[in-house]
Image (cartoon, coloured by chain):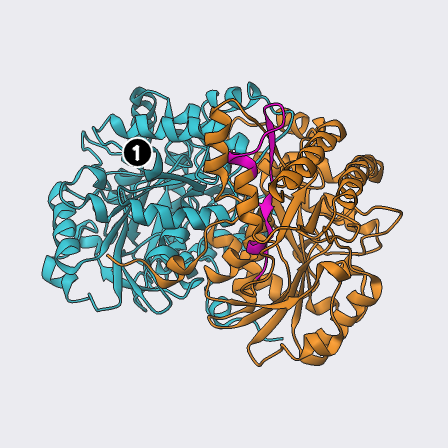
Chain colours: A orange, B cyan
Amino acid sequence: MKLSNRVLAMQESPVRKLVPIATKVKKTGKKVYHLNIGQPDIETPKVFMDAINNYDSRVIKYSFSQGEPVLIKAIQDYFKRDNVIFDDDEILITNGGSEALTFTTIALCDPEDEILVPEPFYTNYNGFTSAVNVHIKPITTKAENGFHLPSKSDIVKLITPKTKAILFSNPGNPTGTILRQDELEMLAEIAKEHNIYIISDEVYRGYAFDGLQSISMSTIKGVEDRVIIIESVSKRYSACGARIGSIQSKNKELMHNILKLCQARLCVATLEQIGAAALYRLEDSYTAEIRDEYQARRDIVYQTLQEIPGIVCEKPSGAFYVVAKLPVQNAEDFIIWMLEEFELDGETIMLAPAEGFYATKGLGKDEVRIAYVLNTKDMARAMFILKKGLEKYNQ
Amino acid sequence: MKLSNRVLAMQESPVRKLVPIATKVKKTGKKVYHLNIGQPDIETPKVFMDAINNYDSRVIKYSFSQGEPVLIKAIQDYFKRDNVIFDDDEILITNGGSEALTFTTIALCDPEDEILVPEPFYTNYNGFTSAVNVHIKPITTKAENGFHLPSKSDIVKLITPKTKAILFSNPGNPTGTILRQDELEMLAEIAKEHNIYIISDEVYRGYAFDGLQSISMSTIKGVEDRVIIIESVSKRYSACGARIGSIQSKNKELMHNILKLCQARLCVATLEQIGAAALYRLEDSYTAEIRDEYQARRDIVYQTLQEIPGIVCEKPSGAFYVVAKLPVQNAEDFIIWMLEEFELDGETIMLAPAEGFYATKGLGKDEVRIAYVLNTKDMARAMFILKKGLEKYNQ
């Protein structure tokens, strides 16, 4: 009755494993500000439910395996804003960015193959790969350097005959780092020189602060046939529970083969695709407004972090996360202590330990990820609680 | 730029690969009755959309990785009708039965492991397994025998040290066969004696004709810890496009490990789960009414098949499919001929070639699957067209 080695080897979600502690604490009446998960408080645009309600839903039929034409068209038009053209067969709709990443991994890699990923990285990349026997090889980046990429030679020396792709999120989860044009071009060079694919997870695109642009890898010339873009409505349109993602690539052979994986699971939820099409039709001004809200929150977070002695943290440029090195030995112990032992007028905060975002053992032990997913007033209060908590913890 | 061997080895969907031919034919104005896919014309019960519309959808948030509590509770109550009790942590909500099967396969099998499956079988079982490097070993069943299981010794001799489970759908897709109590008990014996799991795909449960019961494997005693039930709202509640399935098992260690796979992909669409909970609350009388409708259709199909000389087909007892051996050499050629060459007053039919439902090379070449998913009037007309088509084809 043994289970598979691959499932036994999978780690528990480091973001979700502390949830039972928070649940227990909240039952005692303590208020917990959740900075630990990327669930924004922003309302899902009303067009989403309107589109669903206007849909003829007498028979909720299978959608097409590649996705609803109305959604594929909306995504095509979204990319056209950057002068990037994807044909109908160069877009596949998936169950969230999660399935997009799983399918891409299966299509590029056989068991024991490797994918390079800058660390710290979105922890579920571990799950998508290890469940299908693929290994992540980390490219270590550092808080002191704003989590930007190391030199080309540092990256290239990690490549082996089993390396099939480089995967990264940009803007970065958990770091909030936005890769510069020269970094993307370096990755393109590496991909060409070593004949590997580039998987660019752009689910936070649009959330770039201080006038910066989050450049899509789809705009980089000369690597169109080896670039795969991962999209999702979860973060950009605050529709995490819709589970609508997509895969974009101009490599038609790749897309034809991923379609076989799509066909095996028949389709993605029909209604949610209809709603998602309306989201992709929102003007850039929608994203700009939400970006300004996140930037205001980021400013509050960063300002408070700077006031705390011993914290190492570059100003994050995008998404709605920051990874900070705290003046503690073990960040997870501190997070649990904040939940169980600390309170300020009956309130505390919950952070995500950053260790789970690293593949290299021992890294990130003193780091946390802060998701600024609460309104400015609550964020200010939560950061004040963090400051007071750290003062008391280090006494 | 090579893709993975596992994705290249995947077959195209045999059900969907003829779709382009049908699309072309329909553009010429010919009407095509689709008996080729399991998309029923039955209306999705109104409670589904009502529940979604009554849900507070201001922020479409992530659901829980294990599923929405309201849906888990509804499924628990559904199984209680058979006196089967599943605890909260013994049910996991999935993206359709498809993801339920993929996750179960990953959790039970490492690469190169094997699962026994009676053939002909639901063709997507190939996709769920081969995408994650698991092999299906077929247990051949025959039209002449109503596709019931062979003897215990015939099954046991297929078991190797790599065999981890027996998987079957009951009622059967594509056969419409309902396994008897003694067949289920034989499988239970085999599972115990050879220490393997039983994966029972029960997505058509409730659709059993002529007073028969479709017995859930969850009611068989002595194998509770090695039985995994696959559920879905797609067929029973005509909600194929909702993509809500689930995994049920009293093996808590297994479920704890599958939960890790669920956590990696975060959750299933929130709104669809709310709608699905309302579906599982429908009385048995709902299913009984739809079953009577399918039985009436089955009668039309079976009666016409009996009128055609040279057809081999036992009367199917459940689901809404039948596999019939036609008096032709190659069923796929005949299906294409029916689409492209044949018409009766501007109308024709589309069937699914059954060869793709077999793992053993050469089997099923002269067989088709007929899905009786149209109303009785249309089914009668479609079957008449089949009869006339076969007459002309064999002239």
- Give the camera-side residue of B205 and B175: B205
- State the residue lying farthest toward the front: A395
Q: Which picture quadrant has residue A258?
A: bottom right
Whole-percent x, y for residue A69 in the image: 66, 44
Eyeballing the image, is A138 above or below B71? below
- Residue B175 on the magenta span: no
- Name which residue lies at 52% across and 48% down: B265
Q: Which residue is mark 1?
A: B87
On the image, which quarter does residue A242 sit in?
top right
Residue at 35%, 49% in the rendered image: B369
Left or right: B309, with A326 as reference point: left
**Residue B329: image location, x then y, percent:** 33, 64
Local secondary structure at mark 1: loop
Give coordinates of residue B88: x percent, y percent. Answer: 35, 33
**Which amino acid type is marked by label 1?**
Asp
From the top left corner, tell me how far across and down residue B86 is, in percent: 28, 34
Q: Which residues are magenta?
A: A338-358
Pointer 1 local density, CA inside 10 Å: few below 14, some 14–19, many at least 20? few
